[in-house]
Each structure stands twice: as C-alpha cells, then as structure tokens.
Image (cartoon, rainbow, N blue to C red):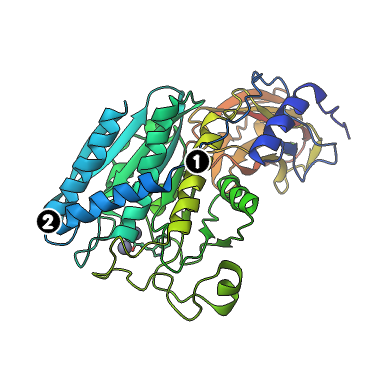
Amino acid sequence: MKLSAPRRTAAAAVIALAGLLGAAAPSAGAASSAAPAAPSNSAWTSTAQALAAPDIPLANVKAHLTQLQSIATANGGNRAHGRPGYKASIDYVKAKLDAAGFTTTVQQFTSGGAIGYNLTADWPGGDPNQVLMAGAHLDSVTTGAGINDNGSGSAGVLETALAVSRAQLQTTKHLRFAWWGAEELGLIGSRYYVNNLPAAERAKISGYLNFDMIGSPNPGYFVYDDNAALEAVFKSYFSGLGVPTEIETEGDGRSDHASFKNVGIAVGGLFTGAGRTKTAAQAQKWGGTSGQAFDRCYHSSCDTTANINDTALDRNSDAIAHAIWTLGTGATNPPGDVYENAADVAIPDNGPAVTSTVTVSGRTGNAPAALPVAVDVKHTWRGDVVADLVAPDGTAYRLKNSSSNDSADNVIDTFTVDASSEPANGDWKLRVQDVASQDTGYIDSWKLTF
Ligand code: DTR
Ligand code: ZN
Ligand code: ZN
Ligand code: CA
C-alpha cells in the first residue's frame, strides 16, 4: 500500500489560517491509512489576520429604534408589509446607507396584492467572488411597531454597516447588507431575493448571517448552529464576554436564513427569544425571569421601544460587528487549495464499488461551479471502470462511464464538476467500480482543488 508523504510546506500556512477561523486543516479521509495528506501546491500565501471590530454604540442602535417607532406611530401604528410604515422604514435605512457611501439597491416584489421591498447595500471592495451577507427583516406585524421584532435586528445590522463606513474598512470578502420585506408573511422577501439571484451570483455568497429579534426584554442568548464555522465565530465572541449561549432550537425555517440555507448557502445568526418561556435553568445563567416569555410582546402592540433589553441589544450588535470584521477581513478561502488522498484502494474485479475520501473543512460557502477532480486509477482495462464523485450530502456526479471496447490502461484524468449547489465542507468521496470480469486495478490517488 503506497503511503503518501504528506506535503508539509503548505500545511503550516493552512493551519495558521485554520487557527484564525477555528477550522481544521484539510485531511485525507477514511479510505486511507496514509498520514493525512495536507493541502499541497496551495497558491494561497496570505495569512491575513482578521482586524478587531470596533464597539457598536448602543445609543446609535437605539436612535434607529426611536426613528422606527416614530415611523410606526406616524403610519397607523405599524411597519407591516404593504403599509406605508414599511416603505417609510426602507426609506429611512436607505438614506443612512446612501449617505455612508454604500451602493444600495431596492428590489420590488408583490405579495398579497401589495408591493414589497428588499433593500441591499454593498460596501465597495473585497473579493467579488466571496460575498459575506448580513441581514434582518425590516417589516413588522400589523398589530404593532415591531421594535424588537425586528427593529432590533434591522438596527443592529444598520449600525454595523455604518461602523464599516466610519472605519472605511478594507475587506478581503465583499460585504453585502440586507433588509428584507414580508418576512412575517412567510419569508417572502428573502425568498424572492434568493430565487431571483442567478446561480452564478448565489455561488459567490460565502455565508449569510441573520439577525431577527436580538433585544428581547427577557433575553436568552441563542446562536444558530446551521454551520459550524459561523456558529464558532459567535460562540467565541460570547465566551469572551463570559456569556453562555445555547443553540437556537425554535426550529429551522423560522426566519430569513432559511431562504439561504434552502439553496445550500452557509448560514449563521443570533436570537434572543420570542414567545417561548425562559426556564429556571436559563434564568440562572442569563438572569431575567423564569416562567416568563423571552418577549411577552411578541407580535403584539406592546412591541415598542420600551420592549428592549439594552444589554442584549448592545451585546448582539457588538457580536454582529465581530462577525463582520472576523469573517470579512480575515484570510479568504485560499484559491487553489488542494485536498488529496493518495492511499491505494484495491478495486475488486467485476465487484462492488470502493471509495476513497477527502475531508474538506474550514471553508465557507459552496463548492465551485467548476470543481476540478483529478483521478489516478491504475487498471489494465479502463473500459471496465465506472467513476463517480460523491458530495458530502450523498449526491453523485458521474465522472466516467464504462465502455466495452476501451482496452487501454489506467484512468488518469481531471474531470470538472459543477458542484456549486454543494456546501464545500464535508467528506467528499471518489467512488470506483469495476463492472466487467478479468483485468482489475486500484485507486492510486485523487484530489479536489478549490
Ligand atoms: N419568525 C420570527 C421569530 C422567530 C421565531 N423563532 C425564531 C428562530 C430564529 C429566528 C427568529 C425566530 C418572526 O416572528 O419574525
Ligand atoms: Zn415576527
Ligand atoms: Zn422577526
Ligand atoms: Ca475487470
């Protein structure tokens, strides 16, 4: 069994980055008994250190809430989809961003016979092929001003964007901020945005961070656990504050991150709780009142500026900035990063398929639309060989079919797979089967290049 000599050169650089992003360096997978093959020939040389985020002034965040409250009061008491208070909210947020140097876009859609609006704001610079998004729904329910739900998330994202402008932040990833319409009707605005984004544009989104209710009056500190790398960014921030966190368990699909997760984009976010009751154990670790809802005014007329816990709003706004600075200015995914398994795997003659695995981790977003799969299979009659790339979720991509008249030796080729619908991280497998008797061989090595 040929053992690969792990490539040490690039490994140190990749592990240095991995330490930054809290991710593990790539390694060979289960089929190999060889030492983990570290990424080799990485064209990535940067060991960019993420910059430290500034404090987000609570007073600034609350000033936005006061404005949203005034808008609701002046427009029938709410900021709901299809009502004048929602468009006025969009106009307020847009004006702040235009004045701060963002490139803003208002996207219209229709729902329930009424026009809705999404607002996106792009910060110039960063790798246009690695877009980091942060968003919040801006609409309220019809029964109230929606200051916690979701003025809090909207204001926290807005003030973080304004802090990026104040810092004239130079980013490695491209930053895009978003405020969604008609979330309360069923994630309508964010789903419209994602569904109308060309696949090539979707593939550029390395992650989406969602903030829906981050100032609940009886707060919990919940972190979305949909993506390990993004979850780690928030958990490490709160552990630095000495604040314990819990996994957000109100179920998937409960806010706009679901629109992005549904198309395979890595998502993360924060939540301080809605109508559920805080337990005694939670009150023990977080303070507040056990046996009472995290937000007693959830979807009610009392969801006003009085319905905010300042400490929770402050901590979560600072956590948003921490995530944007950490993920947006840290080292980008190294282009040309190679994940290889050089362990030999025997292929049974005219028998069951065998696999060889590489583990990809520490990346954000999806795999590329043109993923090179380099295969080296030694065989004495390559017409017998069928080969597939199997993504971490089990989706198989056919690389090579069998053919009865191809008697040449070996399958040594690089195939290109559109893997843009597959999250990058996970165990990728090369699956090979010999489908005709006589002649046989073995997987010599194979590799993916991201
Ligand atoms: N759907 C949100 C409130 C909500 C309920 N559960 C979760 C979990 C994660 C984020 C948000 C929520 C709303 O009413 O807007
Ligand atoms: Zn709501
Ligand atoms: Zn909400
Ligand atoms: Ca054979």
Left or right, 134 with reference to 235 = left
Q: 232 or 354, which lies in front?
A: 232
- Considering every residue shown, the one lying at the far front of the view is 59
Gap in Å between the C-alphas at discs 2 and 1?
33 Å
Q: 291 or 130, which lies in front?
A: 291
- Considering every residue shown, the one lying at the far bottom of the view is 291
Image coordinates for residue 298, horizontal then vertical, percent: 33, 69
Q: 250 or 25, which lies in front?
A: 250
Q: Quadrant of ligand 3?
A: bottom left
Left or right, 296 with reference to 248 = left
Left or right, 373 with reference to 144 = right
What residue would you read off at disc 2?
75
First in sequence: mark 2 vs mark 1: 1
- The structure residue drawn at horizontal position 60% and vertical position 73%, both measured from the top left corner, is 284
Q: Is the residue marked by circle 1 packed among few (<14), some (14-19), or many (20+) residues within 10 Å?
A: some
Amino acid type at mark 2: Asn
Tell me the quarter of the picture where residue 430 sits: top right
Image coordinates for residue 231, horizontal then vertical, percent: 57, 50
- Looking at the rendered structure, which numbered label has been put on residue 265? none
Ligand 1 within 8 A of label 1's CB?
no
Left or right, 327 with reference to 20 = left
What residue would you read off at disc 1?
55
- The structure residue drawn at horizontal position 71% and vertical position 37%, both measured from the top left corner, is 19
